[in-house]
Amino acid sequence: MQLRRVITVLIMVTILVVPFVAFRVLPEIGDPNSAPNSHVTDYYIEHTISECNSPNMVTSIIVDYRAFDTMFETTVMFLSGVAVILILSNKPKKRDDMFRKFNPCTTNTGPSIFKTVNKDVMISIIEPLILIYAIYVLFHGEVSLGGGFQAGALIGMTYLLDVMVVKRKDRDIFNYSLERSVSVAGTGPFIYAVGGILGLIGGGLFMEFEAIPLPIEAPELHSIGILIVEVGVTVGVMCTIITILKAIMDRVSFDDDND
Amino acid sequence: MNNFPALIVVCPLCAALLNLVLNRINEKLGKAVIVLSVAASLIMSVFVLAQVITTGTIHYHMGNYDMPLGIEFVIDTVNGLIVVLVSLIGFLTLLFSDNFGYKFKTRLTKGAANTVLTLLIVGLLGMTLTGDVFNLYVFLEITSLSAYCLIALGGERGIFSAFRYLLVGTVAATFYLLGVAILYGVTGTLNMADMADILNEGGKDQAMLLAICFLVPAFGIKMALFPFHGWQPSAYSYSEAGAAPLITGVMGKIPAYAMFRYLYCIYGTDFKYFNSILVIVGVFSVFGMLYGSIRAIAQTDIRKILAYSSVAQIGYISLGFAIGTPIALCGAFLHMLGHAFMKGGLFFCTGAIRHKFGTVNIEDFGRIYKKMPLTCGTLTIAALSMVGIPPTVGFFSKWYLGSAAAMQGEWIYLAVLVISSLLNAIYFFRLIEKVFINEDKSLKERVYDEFKTCGWKLVLPVVVCFIAILGLGLANVKIIDILMLSLKGVGLC
């Protein structure tokens, strides 16, 4: 047993020390003549606007030049949601029943005890603002900062905020069941894939946005393609967050619940 | 036709993504679409392989961006064959897993398990086809995530071994990413062919050495090469029974193929420390071949026997890489194809026996051949192939490996190859003895209430594996010819 520990420590020290000595092979940060800054990067910087019609270089690389990668990154999000459902469904629900018997839940509706912000009022002001901002981020992704992942996270977080603050009874309008949220999470990456398949239908290669069969000029088609992709990512990320939240909530109930 | 390379991956992907929607409409619809999509990619991969054999390597550029800018799929005869293998075993596993649906209580979890299994197939297909180092990482991520999930579904022990695999696998993914980062730092490109061109200009030996020191353990962990195999036996044994053939048969092979690409396609024999790296890989595989076989002798759970034997069998494949001549590489890839059917077939048989009688202990297998003749036929032929008896594929792959080792004068490798085969014989003949000679234990058939078993879905995979093991063995010259089309001139000559 002792030997095993010594060996482990030795291996860890080697792995930590050797890179410190040897990582000098990497180029200096910000060196304009280094390989990463001169090989493909130059081409991207010079041709992004003319080829992809997108002033935001990061977006154009992520969802146009390397769109195929991002499709599978979105699929990874969906996969994580499905995995959470599968793994959490294996175990019995509500294991803390005994604990709850001795700690009865007290309702805390009505006027707040502390004279702070009234959450019922604030939530109805804050949520629409976050949603508007999310949609702005989504549609502005190709022009300035932002994109699908951020927009999806914002919308998902709005739902999370809503679940945490508003009472369960009042939440019927926007109450997603687990089945529905996970199916919609799957359609997100599917929309993304459809964006690629449209290129195939137009006679091009997969993910070739210029071949999308729409009567618009070629640079505009890149914008359309990027938009389809961003919408897909948004839907996927949003519903994955909701799915994970739902799966955890089905497993245990929180003490703040009123039912 | 010329879009087939992309569609091979995209078809099952779309089916997997839509599965849960279709599952809400009708329980059988989602599964049917998945099975059809994987069948479609099987057919397409056969077409692509035929095209590659006649016209040479195919390059498919995603989004029509040229080589270093976008992502490309590169298909030569080697990965063309592996893609056919992955989609065939994936297709069979999807059919097979129908019989294990009783484990899932709700419709949602049943559909979700199918989704995860399909995404595992997608990840494996993508890892084989891609010609881009970062794209390989993304597919590696999909493969590992779905594998963690499928292993965790195998009961309480499954969850434990999945967690261990998760910890170790994350280290592997990080190491891979570090290796890629170093290579990107000195080349500035992510495309494999472009990277190979830039690295061959020379003067980057130190960075390349550092990167390969990260990459070999990364792939070693993923393929369960000897010192990195710790997660493997329990993960293979306790994984979800319906998905086990795919996990055990194919999942370890694809990282091995990726390692081949790094060693021979990106680094190449001009690399200054190439021979030292090959020696290290060779030492790992020699110890793995002995260790795996010896540990397998001590087990009684058939799944554990097979899992430890996988440690040894992966050693044969990496031994082929370590010898490094085109013949040895052909032997390694023939063994990769053959072993996928052997180990997949053995797990199909184990699953069938488990489904019928609910046991995995080989002490209970007495004269089981009377009750399940087809299954035991495949069990026997796969076991003989593991040992290396002609005319099964196992004999021919070991023959090519052994003759290549002899040609290079690597007598230690040859000796270990023979010793390991003899050790294989010990535990596989023990298995055959249990099946044919031992006393009948009068096992009771398992009764499933409210669950309809589908007999032909259990039998078909077993029969296909039987045919494949014999067929690959008899047609080994043809397979070697096809492999040689791409491997000629690769490696040490």
Image (tube, coloured by chain):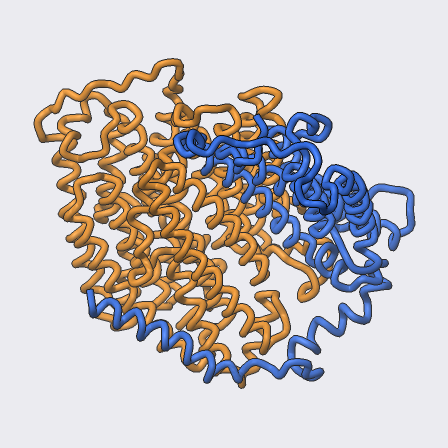
Judge whether A67 appears above or below B157 on screen. Answer: below
- Residue A180 visible in this rendered orientation of the protein: yes
Residue A186 location (% of width, % of height): 63, 37
- Number of numbered tags placed on the structure image: 0
Q: In which quarter of the image is residue B200?
A: bottom right
Query: Could you say where residue B12 lies in the image, as x and y percent from the top left?
Result: 57, 38
Quarter occupied by the C terminus of chain B: bottom left
The answer to whether any part of residue A192 appears in the image is no
Residue ID at (51%, 50%): B80
| Residue at the (57%, 47%) spot, across then down | A76
Q: The blue chain is which one?
A: A
Specify the quadrant of the image occupied by residue B472: top left
Of A202 and B361, nearer the camera is: B361
Whether residue A104 sits left or right of residue B430 in the image: it is right
Residue toward you, A111 or B208: A111
Quadrant of the snapshot with the N terminus of chain B: top right
Q: Position of residue B81 (x, y in %)?
A: 47, 48
Question: What residue sits 78% from the left and 64% below the top?
Answer: A57
Rendered residue at 58%/61% (across/down) = B134
The residue lying toward the viewer, choosing from A222 and A161, is: A161
**x then y, percent, for residue B243:** 40, 37
Q: In this view, does B42 lie to the left or right of B255?
A: right
* Chain identity for the colour orange used in the image: B
Q: As drawn, is B31 to the left or to the right of B242?
A: right
Q: Which residue lies furthest to the top in this view?
A: B450
In front of the other: B177 or B83? B177
Kindly indicate the quadrant of the structure image that contains residue B285.
bottom left
Q: Is residue B25 above or below residue B339?
A: above
